[in-house]
Image (spheres, coloured by chain):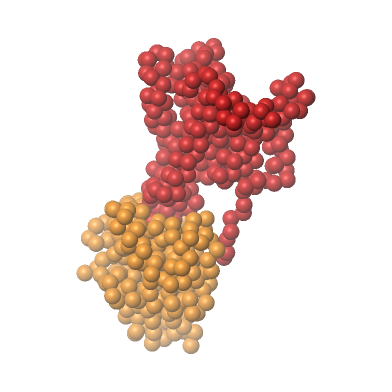
Chain colours: A red, B orange
Amino acid sequence: MTEFWEQIVAGLASGGIYATLALALVLIHRATGVINFAQGEMGMFSTYIAWSLLYTYGVPYWGTFAITLVISFFGGVLVYLALIRPLSRGGDIAIVIATIALLVILNGGAGWIWSPEVRSFESPFPIDRIEIGGVGISWQDLGTILVSIACVIVVFCFFRFTRVGLMMRASAQRPGTSRLLGIRVTLMLAIGWGLAAMLSAVSGMMAAPILTLDPNFMLIVLTYAFAAAVLGGIDSPVGAVAGAYILGVGISLLGTYWDYVTGAPELELPIALAVLLLILLFRPAGLFGRAVVRRV
Amino acid sequence: MALLELRDVEARYGQVKALHGVSLSVADGQAVSILGANGAGKTTTLRAVSGTVKKTGEVVFDGKSIGRRSPEAIARLGIAHVPEGREIFGELSVWENVCLGAVTRRGWRDARRECERVIDYFPRIAGRRGQQAGTLSGGEQQMLALARALVSKPRLLLLDEPSLGLAPKAVRDFYEIVAAMNRDFGLTVLVVEQNATIALDATEQTYVLEVGRVVLEGPSEELQRHERVRASYLGY
């Protein structure tokens, strides 16, 4: 039983990494109506900035964390204002292609600036384990879970209880009407992109100590986050987060208890994507997605 | 003094001209209606005021030319536009919809207190503030759109066919509240209607639009007796 609970905790930790990125995908999808394929690479780029702050400038970890979030926010705003907004006249396809181009540019750019070699990235959490009820939990996993939960809670409270959050939800739903109410829709969408960039930075900084840092390390996280968002419902923030934790735990348990997968970890990603395809086939709105109630 | 003035406004959607030089004026505290058939340019006239259509000519609000300003800037000057089809935020709660009318006001706390006060004018929606707004009936959604406009404390209220698709009782209730706001708080109202009976009843001054031009204007009471209006819009 101990092993089972240990695997649950490990699954929740990777689930947390997917959850923050999946939440970013959902934010952008609700605001812009498209999938931002560069979301993972934005997180990767942010993590490299954090790496520079840590190892080139010697900034302590949590200072680095905060500075990276601020830089990421403005990076996200810039991406929206310089790229996405001017392209919105071209329709959704133009934006999707722009995000794919951005993926490639950030990936190549990071390799060019920081070299493509694999680097280690420090974890803010101690390496030893604590024991809770006979189950050994690493601080690394526990910390990752707590940071991801904190992010999710902050984002939800921001949207539910603040004025800017309300204006952002309105702008995503009905941009034209929002402008008639005096809301600066462009500004709101830019803030949304900034927020999503912050979330992907968190995801990257939590993933890097485990996966090690190289220009491609977020691609796999993006794939899982995408699967999680589809699993929960691409338009449902709650669903995407729940989907991410379910996916994390599911894969962790699968890798431990299903012998085929235990011997071949390379099967984990295909299985996750098979789940994604099945969901798309049989429940396109996701497990938690629901049709909007409308009465005309 | 005129609070709103349109001088020779022309507007077009792509190649199609919708307004061929419309001039009208709304005095401070007045209730004015624009009548006309489908495609006469009523909605476009309102959109010319709120800045959501390409136009030439002059739009003057409170002495300032607003023709070149963005819709959000115009809204912040105190012009509340209740668009055709109500355009409420279906996925948000009733209360959030009301609050959205006040988001641009200074002082979020005071603004929310104003929302509390305004929603009490609307007993049918006041009791359902937690409900998803998309589940309200058409009449309730129209009330919600009006409440949302009023919490911004507008100086000018633009209403686009509020009676469309509503039951007669809902229409009466709606116009009763608008009339009360006009009478008690001096709110200036410019309403566009296909329903001529109710529009002439509810307003002091009326303009009649036909294919993008003002063809008739005058006190609503006089137009009620005008032969052309009776034949074309009142149907008797």
Q: Nearer the viewer, residue A95 or A129?
A: A129
Residue B208 in percent (x, y) is at: 39, 74
- The structure residue drawn at horizontal position 27% and vertical position 60%, both measured from the top left corner, is B60
Instruction: In the displayed orientation, state which residue is furthest to the front.
Output: A133
* Near-viewer residue (B168 or B90): B90
Q: Residue at x 61, y 44 (%)?
A: A233
Residue A121: tell me if it is visible.
Answer: yes
Vertical position of residue B77 compared to residue A73: above or below? below
Instruction: State the image coordinates of residue A186 (x, y, percent, origin top left).
Output: 41, 44
> Which residue is found at the position 41% from the left and 17% from the top?
A54
Of A249 and B34, which appears nearest the observer?
A249
In which quarter of the view is residue B46 placed? bottom left
Residue A154 location, quadrant = top left
Of residues B40 and A117, the one drawn nearer to the viewer in this rendering: A117
Q: Is residue A187 left or right of residue A243?
A: left
Query: What is the x, y in percent for residue A168?
Result: 44, 47
**A62 in relation to A160, above or below:** above
